[in-house]
Every structure is written in C-alpha cells, then in structure tokens.
Image (tube, rainbow, N blue to C red):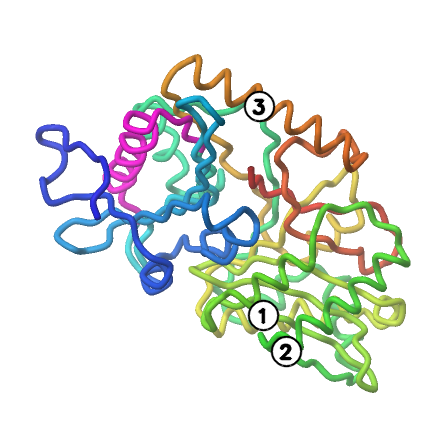
Amino acid sequence: MSIGITHPEGTKSSSTRLRKVTSEEWYSRLPEFDDASIYQTRAYGSCHWSPEQLSTVVLEDNSQTLAMAQLRVVRVPLLQTGIAYLRWGPLCRRKGQPFDADLLERVLSALQEEFVHRRGLLLRVLPPVFETDSWAGAFKSTGQALGFRRIEQARVFRTIRLDLSGSLESLRKGLDGKWRNMLNGAERNGLTISEGADPDFYEQFVAAYREMMARKQFDTTVDVAEFGHMQRELPEPFKMQVFLWLKDGRVLNALVLSAIGDTGIYLLGATRDEGLKLKGAYLLQWRAIQWLKARGCRWYDLGGIDATRNPGVYHFKQGFGGEETEHLGTFESGAGLASELCVKTGERLQALIRRFRSGSDSRLPAGAKCGAVYASPSGKQNRRFDSFRYAS
C-alpha cells in the first residue's frame, strides 16, 4: 500500500513510492543495508515501545527497495498532532554501495511529506551517522535544505569506533601496550570461552549481570529482561551474540553485542570478582573482534564514553586503538509552532513524571535510553556507566 508522497517535478520518477510493509517483509529487506542495526528491528521497536506505535515503511522505485525507516508514532490525545520518532534511521546505505546523497534527499523528503505535511506530526530523526563519517556533511546540508533543525540542547552520544578493515594481526598490534599485555595474561589462564545466540547463553549472562549489579550498586536504567525479550523475538540472523568466559562451568565474564549491517555494537557486559582478577574482559573483547571480522563487519562501536564521569571505562576502551567520535545529533521537522509546542510540553511533563516515579538522577537527559552497562576491568570505577543512545 502506498502512502502519501509527492514527486516534485523533475526530481523523482512517478514510480517512486513510500510503502508500509509487514514485519516479515521488513526483516527480509533489512540485510540489504549497511546502516541497519538492532535499533531498526521490529523486535527492538515492539519491546522498547509497542507494536501499535510502530510504522515501518520502505521507499521503492519500480519495486526496488531504495531506503527503509521504522518510526514510532505517538499522537496527543484529542488533538490532531503528535510526533514521529525515527531512531538510527533512515536506512539508505545500500550494502556494498557508495553513499548516495540524492537517495538521502529522496527518503527524507518522502518521510517529511508523509509524517509532517500529510499527518501533521513533528518528525524527529536520529540518523545512524557520526561526525567522522565521510557523508556527515551531506546529511547536514541535505537536512538543512529540507528544513530540518538540529536540537542543540539534546545530549550528544560519544563513542569509540574501531576500524575492523585491517588484518587481525594489525588490529592486535594497534592495541595499547598495557591492554595487549592484559590480553596476553588472560589467554595464558587457559579458561573456556563459550558463545552463541540461544536463550540459555543470555540467561547465563543475566545471572552474572545481576550478581555484578548487587555487588557494585550501580544506578542504571538498563532493563536486561527487555533485552532478553528482544532476543526471543529477533529472527535467527539478527539475534544478539553472547560471549561467556567460564571457569569450572561458572561465568566469570560476559558480554553481549549485536551485528547487523556493517557495524557491531557493544550492548551489555558483566564481570564477577574473579573475572576482574583474571582480566577476562580483555579476552572476551578480543574474541568479539574476531567474530565481527568473520561476519564481515567494518566497524565495532564500543558504546558510550565519558572521560570525566567514567575514566576507568573510558581508558579501557581507548586501549582498543579506535577513533573517538560523536553522533551527528538529533534533527526535527515540524508541521507548525503549535504542534511543536504541544509535543515538547508533553515531553517535559513526561520527563518530570518519570523522575518523580523513579527518583532518577537529574543528570539523565529526558528520553535517554541506556544501551550498555559496563564495569571497568580494573574494578576501580564502579559508578554508573550508561551508553546513551537517545530512544524517545
């Protein structure tokens, strides 16, 4: 079924259309894009929000899929307004093909036409683009030309990304010397690594994770049960991979990551006391790098960093030899001042209610969703570590 889209004269062919798709069709097309991620899966949307709020659309030309976008649509009761959130999208980098600025313009224009002009919603876009990406400038200029405004007050997600295009030998040489020494020591311990995507692997991670949380008294909004539900919902090719380091059948260290598209994303980690002493986190991360390379991933996104509040985790991730970067930001296109004012007032009230109910730290920005929790391998930094990926 086609949904509202216009074709400005001389810019788009009449065969181009924006079309709603089913969950099955969505998953069948997801592997076609290098910028696909777990945040654009139906399982993430259904578990994190609700199936009723999701709108999954593809941009087609002569039945060829050009781009995809999964949005969360929330309407203000009794008013003809609301918001459409697009997190970590749109997907428009076709697998193995160079970035196409014209295609980006086409899909942003189509989404704007459908959700802003036809439905009267505020469209908020969090693109899968980092400042160091070669196409970051094109996204900024294209968005600006179409009237998208960057939300300056939104907290910007910072990370370290490791380029996996080199050989394993060169990647190992690129590790910080101290980090590499820790890895060598962990390898000499001769313990077992077990890995997989079956629910049992995730349950073993959860047991280690809950023990760590009870011991360290972390303050976090991560819901490991939600991730577990996602794991059960995800089709086999898209499930998260769990890595466990065991001694006598007991999990000492564990990590969970996702690899969809050309980027592996570190999601969750857990460490028991003995795992800290034996430096198992280093060995599991090295095994994760090997696994991602075998899957053909170009990048490893190590999750959020904060050199001031979480120096232990920051220095651990620095040891990978990757590049620090930050997310491009959050952009909005609105149907009018009244619509934007209504939505943003509602968001402020929602944030106040959440803080009141949870007693959460005011440092957490409204609408932030934590994507990773990790204890420093040294065991010294035991404060909260949240990998901010805005999920409103």
Which residue corresponds to the image point at 59% horizontal and 77% vertical from the top-left?
198
> Is 183 drawn above or below residue 27 in the view shown?
below
Q: To which residue does mark 2 refer?
A: 195
Badge 2 amino acid: Glu
Element carrying mark 2: strand
Residue 103 locus on image (x, y percent)? 25, 42
Residues in magenta, as a range? 99-124
Q: To which residue does mark 1 refer?
A: 241
Which residue corresponds to the image point at 47% horizontal and 45% vertical from the top-left?
88
Quadrant in which residue 17 is drawn: top left
Residue 81 locus on image (x, y percent)? 42, 24
Whether residue 106 is in magenta: the answer is: yes
- Number of other residues with Cα within 10 Å of mark 2, as a class: few under 14, some 14 to 19, many 20 or more: some
Counting residues from the N terminus, which is met first, the one under dot 1 or under dot 3? 1
Q: CA distance from mark 3 to mark 2?
A: 44 Å
Labelled pair 1, 2 in contact (Cβ < 8 Å) = yes
Quadrant in which residue 33 is drawn: bottom left
Element carrying mark 1: strand
